Amino acid sequence: MKRHDIFLAGVGGQGILLAGEILCLAFMEAGLDVKKSEVHGMAQRGGSVTSHVRCGRQVFSPLIPEGGADILIGFEALEALRWSHFLKEDGILLVNRQKINPTTVTSGRMEYPSRIYDALKKRHPGMRIVDGLKLARRAGDGRTVNSVLVGAVSRETEIPEETWKRAISKRIPEKLVPVNLHAFELGRGR
Amino acid sequence: MESTITRLLSGNEAIAWGAYDFGVQVASAYPGTPSTEILENLARLDDVYAEWAPNEKVALEVAVGASLGGVRALASMKHVGLNVAADPFFTASYIGVNGGLLIVSADDPGMHSSQNEQDNRHYALAAKVPMLEPADSQEAYEYVGRALEISEQYDTPVLLRVTTRVSHAKGIVKRTAGRIKHRKEQGFVKNPSKFVMVPNYARRRHDAVEERLIRLQELSETIPINRIEWGRREVGIITSGVAYQYAREARPRASFLKLGLSHPLPEDRIREFARGVKQIFVVEELDPFLEDRIKALGIPAIGKERLPICGELSPETVKHGLDGKQQRKAVSPAEVPPRPPALCPGCPHSATLYTMKKLKLTVMGDIGCYTLGVAPPLEAMDSTLCMGASVGMTHGLDTALETDPASRCVAVLGDSTFLHSGIAPLLNIAYNRGTSTTVILDNRTTAMTGFQDHAATGRTLQGEKAPAVDFEALGKALGIDSVRTVDPYEMKEMEQVLKEEVEARHSSLIVARRECLLLKRGTRKAPKTVDPDKCVGCNLCLMTGCPALSRTPDGKARIDSAICSGCPICGQLCKFDAISHLT
């Protein structure tokens, strides 16, 4: 089984830590060593949130080195750009189609980068945009964007679909499992 | 319960499971990032007594008492918490233990959520206690057991020092045991010459501590967690904690001396390791703690000339340091607007801080969510030092500037912070006839660390009913002249009360009470909206820094209904009646 270094970036409240946890559980179930690192506390109050997920035969550092991620999942476009230097030059960039203004922008002091998807595409021509919110709503709950994105990234691994689904079912409250599995399927695509 | 269970656990969860499995009976802590989840997880397990103490000093004293009573005990805290607990910590080293006594210090290199990045390994050296440094969750789990054994065998408190990237990193943990009880056959047995630290007895105990250190050093030479991993002999890396992981990744084939018990140092093992390699590197986060002492053994070593003292290490800083190359600047994208953390939409603190800014007050701040009020546009915080410092500093500043108009000064601190370290300095104001004004931003929780209960919420760590401190009665009991309560959402009243109390020549306590909105999720009011015909674009409403408010291209205000809490703050600021509830 291949090793994967997956960097998740977004805004507090988008379900990044939970998505990271599900990735870890799936890799674990596939028999891999896993590590994950993130920061709690003050940094989470509407700030930029990241999670480093690493798996392989044996993982040492809980942090992915800059320029070392095989996959970067941007839950929000600006955060994808902010952390894009963590992605390998030939790495896979998945970006959720969503923009959330930081307070530095809402207060009128700075501007949200115009043509941000172009800027991302320039850095990583293979970028894939995922319509997270649209697919989550189609699944039945706009809050399942993170499961859509887990679905999208699952395609880039050799782990079977059933393993992913078991990981989701393990970690998500029982009554929300069906809608999240549906969101996962839509993200994964058929 | 199964005796071996393999699970994905954070370092903090692993410490909690370690404490459980290796028989901790009593645990006490004050919340603080990155240590908080240790007690939160322990509290969920049966048959362990776990509590929130008002501060780390109390937490450690509780643990010391429990240890003398013959049970295994734990106190956990963030790095700066050990400053608060330093008084009992140093003398607990003299008293020793009955049941095993473990103190967990969770340091925060990089200051993700802290006011400094002190290296608490110095505390082990200064208090002459052994220190263990796990490098991941599995070790965090196992080292709890080892530490408790060492504690009992050597009659000493033990410091378990972790960092953010151990506490908040997850890894696979295999539990090696189910819960084992470790109650000593004898509970508390009177022994004044060991437990009563009057000078005459303490002198003898100091001798015992020095003798203990020599025996601990012998242990350090043989303990398997101080291990040599021989690889290529060109470079030998001495390291501890998470730095080991970065170094192993950067130099998978080098030789390693990994120190799990990093105080006292295994001097003979270090010499043996140094003889076996051409060049010694010391890879450690923050201060040259290992490096200085290795060099003192006369062993040439490379360390902080290649690795930074400031900030946390990362796989790339360690790699570049070992390569001896200037760190290549990562090609980060240019001109990306920062996304700093901010007070939430509808936060009652933002209303109070806005009013203080409007009155041009000097705000001696404190540690909590409200510290975020330093950021523009609020910019309503003029100092933050440590827990509870706002109150003493205000008294000092008021005293120094007695005749100066700049002495329109207020102390601002949260309810949990006040209980932690604000009561004694408030008493000091009353006792010394000070005239300062203290404002408790009472949001009924410890919000910043994730909504922990405290002595004024009426609930314990387990959510059980408890007596709740009455701040107003307490202020009066301490001798404060004027005690008033204001709802921060009533901004006119807050302005009036602040004005009166700051100008008055008496001591004042204002309790600004409104529950944190995040405690009441699901009870959100209808969001507000801006009538573009009435809005003149004065942008006054934007000055509270509410994340739901923004400016449209034509300069008017706009409210993001998805995140607006429907609170009355911005509506009260608008002079043109342009803000109302969305219907």
Image (tube, grey):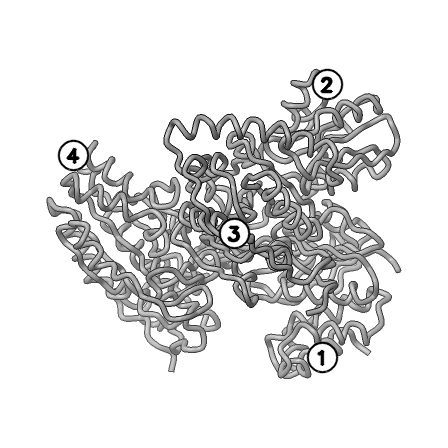
Q: The residue under label 1 is which amino acid type?
A: Leu
Read off the chain for label 1. Answer: A
Residue B500 or residue B531, whichever sits in front = B500
Find disc 3 in the rendering and name its residue.
Answer: B186
Whether residue B321 sits left or right of residue B539 in the image: it is: right
Camera-side mark, 4 or 2: 2
Which residue is identified by label 1?
A181
What numbered label is drawn on residue B402? 4
Mark 2 to mark 1 CA distance (whole Å): 59 Å
Q: CA distance from mark 1 to mark 4?
A: 66 Å
Secondary structure, mark 4, is loop
Q: Do discs 4 and 3 share a chain?
A: yes
Q: Residue at 49% across / 61% down in the picture?
A: B49
Which x, y percent locates residue B358?
25, 51
Which sits earlier in the primary sequence, circle 4 or circle 2?
A: 2
Q: Nearer the viewer, mark 2 or mark 3?
A: 3
Measured from the top left, where is residue B278 in percent x and y?
A: 83, 21
Residue B5 as seen in the image, left or right of residue B311: right
Q: Residues within 10 Å of mark 2 (few under 14, many from 20)?
A: some
A66 or B194, which is in the foreground? B194
Three-letter amino acid code of the residue under disc 3:
Gln
- Please say whether residue B573 is visible from this viewpoint: no
Of B482 and B217, nearer the camera is B217
Residue B94's spot in the image, x, y percent? 48, 34
Q: Read off the residue under disc 2.
A: B299
